[in-house]
Structures are given as C-alpha cells and as structure tokens.
Amino acid sequence: MLPLLLSRSSMSSEVNKTGSWRFLRPRYDEKTAPCGAACPAGEDIARIEMLTAQGQFKDAWELILRENPFPGVCGRVCYHPCEVVCNRREYDEAVGIHVVERFLADQAPQYGPAAGLDRNEARRERVAVVGAGPAGLSAAYFLAILGYRVDVFEAAPEPGGLLRWGIPRYRLARSAVADEIQRIQNLGVRIHTGRRIPEDFLARASETHDGVFLSTGHCASLKLGIPGVELQGVEDGMGFLRRMAAGESGPLEGEVAVIGGGNSAIDVARTAVRLGARPVIIYRRRRQDMPAFPEEVEMALEEGARLLDLRSPVRIDRDGQGLLLTVQEMVASGVDAGARARVEPNPDRLERISVRRVFVAIGQEAEETWMNPTGSQGGYSVYDNSSMLLTDRGFPVIRGGDIVNDVKNITRAIASGKEGAMALDMLFRHGPERVGPRLNECRVGHGRCLSMEVYRSGARAARSRHVVEYKEINVDYFRFLPRIVQPRLLKAERTASFAEIDLRISASLAMREADRCFNCGICNQCDNCRLFCPDLAVAREPSPRGRAINYDYCKGCGVCVVECPRNAMSLAQEKDEVS
C-alpha cells in the first residue's frame, strides 16, 4: 500500500492581515428600541425584557428604577404606549410589557434594597416639592438620587395624589402604592401631609429652600353648567372616588348617570356597579372618541354599565325621590384636528332618563389660578414636560404634572418629575443657559422622554438614538409565539368586591413573555457575530460587551451585521478610504 501524503504548513497564516483589504468597517452599535422611545418614563425596555428572559429579575427591576420609581403602579394602570409601537406587532403580537413590569414589581419584596439606586454625592441645596402625586413624588425621588435634600408638602392626609385617592382599588392595589412611596422615603425624602400651601408660599420659599417643584395637579372638577346641577343627588365624580378611597361612601341602588368619557368617568361607573347600582354613561361624542382606555370601557360594559354616546345633558330636574336627566342627541359632522368627531346638537331629539344619582366627571382644573404657569415674565422657560420660572432674585420655580402636561396620565407625570429634577440639578450646577441643551442630550430616540441614566453618563449614554424599525430586525431567528393572556378575575368575581381584578403571573410565564421580545438594537450575547465570521476576526473578551472585532483580519464583508438578529451592529465606510 502506498502511503497517503497530506501537505501541511508549519507556518501560521496570521502574517496575512486580511483587514488591509477592507473598505467597510463593522462595529458594535447598540441602538434605541421603539418601545423605549415611546415610554414617557424613558425605561430601557429592551434590556429589561432581556434580563427578565434570562431570569435576572432583580437586575431587571433595578433597571426600571433608574428611570421610573413606580414600576408596580405602571405595571397595573399605565396605558402602555410602548406596546403600540412594539416591532413584534408586525410579526405576531406585541410583547406584554406592562404584564412583565408588574411581575418584576410584585417580586420586589424578595430582593431587599435596590442596589441599582446608587446616589450622587450629597449637595447643600434643599428643594421643596408641592404635591405628593406621581409628578411630585417622582421629582423628589430623582432629586434625592441626584444628592439633594427634599421636602414634600401634601394637603391630603396621605401621599399619593391620584394614585391614592383617584384610582379604585380594583385597578390599583393600595399596597403597591404604599410600597413604592416607602421606597422614596427610604432615600431620605421627607413627606409632610396635611400641609396645604398658600399662594404666598412661593414668595417665602427662598427663606428655607433653594428651589421649588410645583405639582399641585388638577383637583378642582369642571362644572357642568346646565340647570339643575345644584340639586341634591348631583355629585362630583372625583369627589365620589375620593370618598370611596377614604371609606366614606355607602351602597348605591337603581340606575345612576355618569356624565363624561374619560378614565375617571369609567372608574366612577365601575365603582357604582360594585356598590349595587346600574350606571349609564353619557358621552357627547362617539365611543371611539372617548379619552378613556378602550380596554377599561370594554370591561365597564362587560360588568353591566350602559353607554349612551352622542348624547349631551341639557338639564336635570327633580323626579320624586330621584332625578330626571334630559339629554340631547348629538350628530357627528366631521372630525377635528385630533381625529375626534365634531358634533352638533339635534334640537328635535331629546331623551329623558330617570336616575337616582348623577355623577359629573367631565374633567378637572387647578384649584387656584396661581398654580397655573404664566409665561409673561422674563426668565421663563418651557420644556417638554415642565416649565421653569426664575424670579427676579434667581429663585427657580418649576411647574410639572397636570398643570403643564397636555396629556394627563401617570407616566407623563413621572416624565415631568424626572425632567424637573434634571432641570434643577443642571441649573444649580451650571446655570440656566445649560438646562435646555442638556435636556435635549438626554432624549431617548427623538421623542419627548428623557433618560436619567443618560443624564448621569451611564452605559446607556453611549447608545445611538436611531430607533430600530421592524425591517431592520432579522426575523429568521425568531419563532411565532402567542402573547400570554393577562389572568383576570371572572366577571361575577369582579363585580362582587373591590379585589384587584388583574392577577400576577408566574416567573415561568414572565420569562416566556419577555423572551418574545426582539430586544431591538440591544446585544444579548447570542454570539452570531463570532460564529458567522469567515475570518475568525470576532473573539470573546472579558468586557461588558463580551465580544471584540480584530480589525487586522476583518475584511468588512458584513456577514456579522446581516446575521445580527437585533440590529445591534452597523456597517460603515472606512474613513481613510481613498476614492
């Protein structure tokens, strides 16, 4: 038999540095996920979902706390605009981001103190926060993290604002609110309840504090302005919810009318159902125009409420022991700039409804005119979620929350508090001329939300603002998976008590749902870049990224970029290429 001879080199091919052929250069380039850009609180959602899918629940929870002090609240009652823009929607269904967030918050008691809440060095300045609602408490939270001493003044006997006094228990458990307020107090924030602030407080505040964040909210209900509103049995809807929260409201019976189409009106109607009444909701536009969350409207109807849309109340009369509500039919005659129906009355169509009570929930405004921003003075600046006035002596008053936000909800209030805290910190450190430019540098994507981690020069600051689109995701690496269904009490169970109707999910379900996330723009260590590199130019390294490209051998073929499932890499032309 003849021997089989194989040629073999005794030299390494490393001398042939094929990187010299390159005119395109791949690089690791983490980007912004659309959910993070849409979240008013600026949460790093793509990374939160990645950590949750890996079972790193404490790390994921602490990552939320860098941007949002209320994960338990937002996991329950946020309207989750993040899910509306989720890239996964174009593949199968959006990720249940709020369900995962609530799971992480419900797990929090097992974690102990949040290690992720590292704080800046203590500052000498002291800040007064007026109003202990979500905006004021968020401002206090972030100011404390930035090193400031904070006093919060609240007129009510307990802090929380809308969270404590406006949202019923079946939507938002009292324990979830209390736990998150306690975490804020653990940072050294002092909350003074039962302290109603007079108008001259702003003139005197400079004697005890170095700045004010004013977030008194909209606590005065708008008046209906029709004959009969002064009759006994006609009641303010928000006042009714406050009495319920304080345990001061008794049972109801018969049919009751709820006038309005926002979330407060729906909360009043669903509360009335639980107290034994049959509510009818009167709304002057179409159902699809209602500002209330569609899911909340649907559940209200499931639970027994009735909706009369395109109806406007014109008068209320006494009817024996009850009330007679006269409503006028409205006719849609086009749409306005917000795509809501433009309506006109039909004078020939009146309808009378006999009810036991009438609850008015058509909106709210500030209790006092001095609480509203006034932009006529010098030194007045308007930002995306707050405004700042510097008095003649340079004393800063920042207004936030409902008194400045065009959209009034909890996450926008959180965004307002965060922005106000950043603005005060930048003002104290570098003066008013740097506030606006620095806030712009902290945007997530190109929207209105800001990142405290970016402001504090954390790892997120190195991320590109480019918002990843669906077409930039390599969906070949993902499989179709149905979105989990939020576990919920049955209808008969829901209306029988004020027990929280949305139930928590298990750890396995949370991991499964989080694993559906594309993690748009974020490296999750899948190793495709290393495995597919034909030149073995990608190697592992002991760094936070865990990978490095050896440009001595990278020919710039771009395979690594194409095979990155999440668009966490980019391919750009070499700067020194000779044309």
Image (cartoon, rainbow, N blue to C red):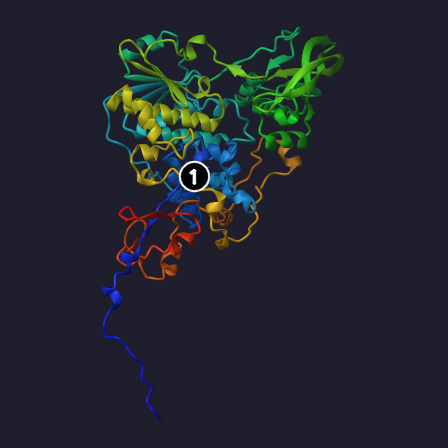
Question: Which residue is under mark 1?
Answer: 467
Horizontal and vertical percent position of residue 367:
48, 11
Rendering quarter of residue 341: top right
Residue for point 41% across, 36% down? 43
Horizontal and vertical percent position of residue 174:
49, 29
Horizontal and vertical percent position of residue 161:
46, 22
User: Element type at marker 1?
Assistant: loop
Residue for point 32% across, 61% down? 536
Whether residue 75 is visible to the viewer of this picture, yes or no, is yes
Residue at far bottom of view: 1
Describe residue 142's horizontal placement relative to residue 514 as left or right. left
Q: How many marks?
A: 1
Whether residue 149 is visible to the viewer of this picture, yes or no, is no
Rendering quarter of residue 71: top left
- Mark 1 surroundings: few (<14), some (14-19) or many (≥20) residues within 10 A: some
Amino acid, disc 1: Val
Horizontal and vertical percent position of residue 437:
32, 26
Residue for point 26% across, 32% down? 120
Residue at far front of view: 579
Query: In terms of depth relative to the viewer, which is nearer, 331 or 224?
Result: 331
Residue for point 49% across, 15% down? 219
Describe residue 493's horizontal placement relative to residue 326 as left or right. left
Instruction: State whether residue 22 is above or below residue 335.
Output: below
Query: In terms of depth relative to the viewer, which is nearer, 444 or 353?
Result: 444
Q: Quadrant of the N terminus?
A: bottom left
Query: In terms of depth relative to the viewer, which is nearer, 360 or 331?
Result: 331
Rendering quarter of residue 41: top left
Instruction: State whether residue 501 is above or below residue 190.
Output: below
